[in-house]
Amino acid sequence: MLKKALIFLTTALLSLQAYSDYDMDGVEDSVDRCPNTPFNELVDIYGCTIKKAWSEEHFSIIYGIGFSEADYATNRNVDTFSQTLQVDYYYEEFSLQASTSYYNSDDDSGMNDSFLGAYYTLSIFERVSLRLGGGVILPTYDTGFNNNNMDVVASANFSYTAEDINLFGGYSYTVLNDDDIAGVVSYQNTNSYSGGAGFYPLNALYISSYYTNSESIYKDTENIETLTLYTFYSIDKNWFTTFSYTYGLSDTAGDNAVELRLGYYF
């Protein structure tokens, strides 16, 4: 009898060690086709959402530290350290975002411009989504060149996901309301394009790379071109961290920029 009990206990412990369900949806990771499913969603036998168990209303707070070799507002190449704070609100497909940052460069320090935005995500097809957004850039940063008016931004981003692969791209248009200074500086509205690809080597880890081409806010200035490597790691159900490295491809972009962020989702 004792021998049978020991065999049963050993078998149970081995089974528990072999079983892995990172997103805790009741479907083992080896057959889970939809990893990282939110805990408030009911799933099918493949781990994909059937319906939400209750209204998806969430918040996230993200703090980041970064270093760059460029000051995009003044188009100068200087060593700049920054701290960022971002707060997000989510309700089903709708979200709000507020962000601001503080910089400290070789010869100056203070607040960067702040941002307030709203987004709505549309599911175009089963694996394709479109995220539409709009927002305002608040002039909390003053270069001394009359750039102290509120600017307006509109954006559209698409995403295609097939199993562990993700393809994405985006476009944004910024209306600058800053006043020109005759003979010194002339501002212009800007277009920005981006595109890239990412994949999930692990359920909790996402890695992507993307290219960005943005017009300068100054007329008759070369576009800002960059290439970015981005990673997202889900520590647990609430905590996550991101890391990005950006390499400048144009003379108007800084040579290097890095940012590490820590977020809490609830």
Image: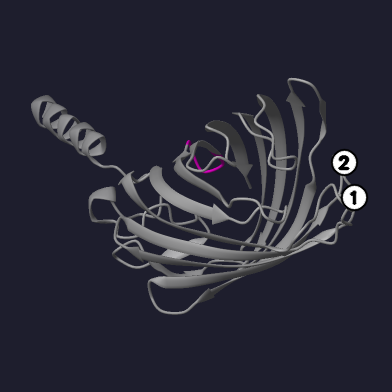
Query: What number of labels is visible?
Result: 2
Q: Residue at x 53, y 55 (%)?
A: 213
Callout 2: SS? loop
Q: Are marks 1 and 2 in contact (CB under 8 Å)?
A: yes
Q: Is residue 2 left or right of residue 217?
A: left
Residue 133 image point, x, y percent: 66, 67
Residue 148 image point, x, y percent: 90, 50
Query: Which residue is labeled 1 in the image?
Result: 148
| Closer-to-camera residue (61/196) | 196
- Badge 2: residue crowd in 10 Å (few <14, some 14–19, many ≥20): some
Q: Residue furthest top?
A: 106
Q: Given the image, on which type of amino acid does mark 2 rest?
A: Asp
Q: Is residue 238 located in the magenta-colored stretch of the structure?
A: yes
- Residue numbers of the magenta segment: 235-239
| Closer-to-camera residue (160/240) | 160
- Badge 1: residue crowd in 10 Å (few <14, some 14–19, many ≥20): some
Going from N to C along the chain, the mark reached first, 1 or 2, is: 2
Query: Which residue is labeled 2 in the image?
Result: 142
